Amino acid sequence: MHFKSFLLLIALVVSNQFNYSQNSKYDKVFAETAQVLLSSDPKKALSNTDYLYKISQNNAEKIKAFMLRATLLRQYGLRNEAITSLKRADSIAIVDKNYTQQARINGFLSTLHRENEIYSLGKIYLQKALAVSKKIEDKNEMYRFQGNLSQEIAYYEMYASNYAKAIAHLKSGNILFKKAGSSIDINFQTAVNDELIAKNYLSLHQVDSALFYFEKAYDELEDSQSANSPLKGFILNGLANVYAQMGDNQKAQLHYNKAEQIADESNFFTLKQEVYTSLLEFYKKTDNKKYILYNEKNSKLTKDDEQSRKIIADDLIKTLHKNQIKSKSQYEKSKFIIVGCSILVILILIAFFTYKRRQDYKKFKTFISKNETVYDKAETAPKKETTKEYMSEATENTILNSIKEFEKSHFYLNKDISLNTVAADLGINHRYLSYVINKNTSKDFAGYINELRINYIVDRLKNDPNYLKYKISYLADQAGFSSHSRFTITFKKITGVSPLDFIRYLQNEQPDVS
């Protein structure tokens, strides 16, 4: 999501937090989580969302807890988990006929599906948000929310390269913000939209119009309550792009320098990435050494951010699973105390269906029993005598440890992976790497990579119900395969069944957790 959209999303979650509640403890924890922990301590923030739900005194507070949870999960790339949280919030909002929250939830769902590139479903949620927003009784609130939705519509048009339509929606959004009156920071809201309008004009090569709206956005931001927002960096970068297109390199460089300073001081990833990319293109034509410098900066920034997000996301996933197990255990205990004998009947039924399911699952048993990583196998596999002839045991163990770390990074999902690139990345002779993989997995490099990829998709299908809804082509792309057919052939070769049959089996046999 673009910075401005995410900023508005945070504002929507945090805004009016005292309107529905007089629960001071709830408000204090909510404010700390939303304003501080969301970025500084995501694991603690996730734990707090569970706590907020427990101490909620009404459904409005429960909805806010779910939306805050979804915001956190989305921030670290866990969009499917965020969608699940929002659906729980939506079910409560529908019962309460809380149209404001229904509109926000469906708008958020639209954004998440757009980011997942499931545009058709995203537009359905967008239309739901628009329809329910008309039922909001507070006219100022209605206009404010419809203004935000106009920006979401504009993003769909921008992705489709319909820049003129995007501009029209953004201008309509500005009119709606002005109708909302003093309940919002109008200058900031219009500054966000005008910066996007300028970008669309730049995409249409209408430089004069782009310059006008970038300058307008800058003035609006200066008059807003958030004059020092990183949004200023985006605007300055946009102005620099305009001057670069006009051939005024001196002004362009001056504005790039100001934008870069804000990016570095704020350490805001999206802003830094946008500024570095612009400088990369600018110096490509004017200074080869600086072009190389910003190319390296941009690459390092992306790599560091992806690695950081993966580490945090993995930690959050573990916490989610741990909390789910804990919640399930507590629920079963309380239910046992309340319903007593009924639980015994339920347990008998569960045991019966579990047994039946295990019988049905035998056709997958052969594959699952093989679903081990190379380093697990290496711990139990007997060493061959030829090891001593080819390399020392210590060397082989070192390489196995490197492969273990490689597997954890999911680097094998990269479509352009090859034996040479992996060897170079691990700092290992490619012949040694090939030998160790073959010796410990009885597979060549391609077979080893394909099995890792299929294991990854199987794990997602088994543990994430949302994956059961995706097309085979999308699963193939997620697994790193270049074609639908190659993925299908490889999946069947490794598991013994086609991906479609596997999905149908899970859909029929696994409970619906959406």
Image (cartoon, rainbow, N blue to C red):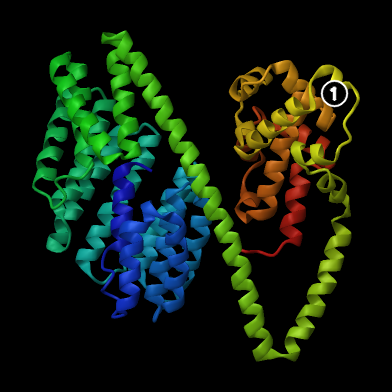
Q: Residues within 10 Å of mark 1 (few under 14, many from 20)?
A: some
Observer able to see residue 290? yes
Quadrant in the rendering for residue 371: top right
Can the viewer see residue 197?
Answer: no
Position above or below: 388 against 73: above
- Camera-side residue of 408 and 141: 408
**Could you tell me residue 72's position as x and y percent?**
42, 55
| Residue at the spot of label 1 | 387
Residue farthest right in this picture: 385
Query: Which percent across, then down, holds residue 216?
Result: 11, 38
Look at 80% across and 40% down and name the residue there: 379
**Which element carries disc 1, helix, strand or loop?**
helix
Residue 376 found in image quarter: top right
Does residue 37 appear to the left or right of 236 in the view shown? right
Q: Position of residue 428 (x, y in %)?
A: 66, 20
User: Which percent across, then down, holds residue 432?
Assistant: 74, 19
Quadrant location, the C terminus = bottom right
Please report the residue visible at 62 percent of the width from the left and 78 percent of the height from the top.
331
